[in-house]
Amino acid sequence: MASITAVARLVHINPSSKLNPSLISATKPLFPFFSLKSSYYPIVSSSAASLTSSRAMSYDKQLIAAKKAASLASLLCQNVQKGLLLSDVQSKSDKSPVTVADYGSQVLVSFVLQQELPSQAFSLVAEEDSGDLRKEDSQETLQRITKLVNDTIASDGTYKVSPLSESDVLTIIDCGTSEGGSNGQHWVLDPIDGTKGFLRGDQYAIALGLLDEGKVVLGVLACPNLPLESINNKNQNTFSKSGCLFYAQLSCGTYMESLAGSPPVKVHVSDTKNSEEASFFESYEAAHSSHSLSGSIAKKLGVKAPPVRIDSQAKYGALSRGDGAIYLRFPNKGYREKIWDHAAGYIVVAEAGGVASDASGKPLDFSKGRYLDLDTGIIVTNRKLMPAVLKAVQDSLKEQALPSL
């Protein structure tokens, strides 16, 4: 069960915290209505102690902007999902499906962040670039994206700007080509995490994180189809009328509220220490993670409940509020994990009291660029269960003779 405490504020405000001018470098705006800038931090451990007191700073403004950006992008995605057509799907060289909503979401997030944080340099590590959309046979798709973005901005009413042109949209998409790394601040975005779930009408998430000197310092997960109540004993792919917004800031905990607007509640991971009572999450698609390996691990732990299989970083959100106690991800050999697939979810779970590591027990490192450098797979659970889960993982890997240890 989730451990939930009602709170009367959206974010913790620290009036004494000020941005370090040395971390901020001004850049010229891309458009008359854009001002750009960047600098941020991923947590390598789930504890705020990983940052020294001399580096302590508030990310309140960035968190407010991130929540706004993810929420607005979720509106566009919800509208597209309702009328989803097969013709919306393109195929890229990596064979991953890309939708109109994927591009539109990335444009909106980038647009909102630059509008809300005009004095900060802007660096974004994102999944999409404009290459496919610049092809002659993609003009209709580009027109649809541009219209969807402009309609969403207009319906929100916050930003009094001229409509974006198709050229503007292409340029904004390519704002996401940063390589990230250990220097400065970088936003990290998966505009639609769980694309296959999105296409099926199931779970997906807009996942936005912020790195500062290679460490995750805040994260927002907008999960339009995830209900506010626990998904235990329910069809995990049932639509929610409102959806969930999870958000976390370093040293401030993790909160959840409705995408439609509701008082925020503080959430905490399950505190179970008995692996037999634990339930675990894994990817819906067997191609994304080895279900057989997860099954072997669950057997060693004595887990009785069947796995909860859902798409996207919605798993991180559900785990952060105690819907399950373990998340296992073991992709196929040769697959490289991208930082946008885990950054936001990582801090959401970490600030809710959880821990994450690779299969060797090393903490996730988001400072190496666009990819995570890790051993075999990812384990996410609470502190009490981690030793037993890690041992079961390593024993199962040895038995299946998977390369890692």
Image (tube, helix red, strand yellow):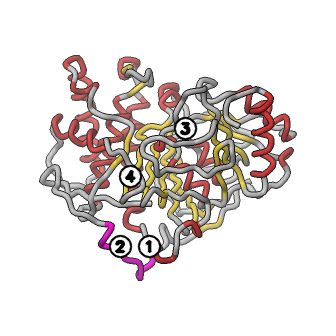
Q: Mark 1 points at which residue?
A: 57
Q: How crowded is mark 2: few (under 14 residues within 10 Å), some or many (20 or more)?
A: few
Query: Disc 3 versus disc 1: distance between alpha carbons?
Result: 30 Å
Q: Mark 3 points at which residue?
A: 312
Query: Disc 2 versus disc 3: distance between alpha carbons?
Result: 33 Å
Q: Which amino acid does label 4 sit on?
A: Trp
Query: Disc 3 versus disc 4: distance between alpha carbons?
Result: 19 Å
Of circles 2 and 3, the one toward us is 2
The image quarter containing residue 34 is bottom left
Question: Could one spot residue 235 in this view of the protein?
Answer: no
Q: Mark 2 points at which residue?
A: 19
Q: Mark 4 points at which residue?
A: 187
> What residue appears at the point 44 percent right and 25 percent down from the top-left corner?
96
Mark 2 touching mark 1, by CB under 8 A? Answer: yes
Query: Disc 2 versus disc 1: distance between alpha carbons?
Result: 7 Å
Task: Mark 2 or mark 4: name the one nearer the start of the chain.
Answer: 2
Q: Position of residue 236 (x, y in %)?
A: 65, 36
> What residue appears at the point 67 percent right and 28 percent down from the top-left corner?
290
- Over which residues does the magenta segment extend? 13-23
Task: Mark 2 or mark 3: name the one nearer the start of the chain.
Answer: 2
The image quarter containing residue 26 is bottom left
Residue 259 numbered tag: none
Q: Where 380 sits versus 50, above or below?
A: above
Residue at disc 2, secondary structure: loop
Q: Is residue 63 left or right of residue 348?
A: left
| Quadrant of the drawing holding the C terminus | top right
Task: Mark 3 or mark 4: name the one nearer the start of the chain.
Answer: 4
Residue at disc 3, secondary structure: loop
Task: Mark 2 or mark 1: name the one nearer the start of the chain.
Answer: 2
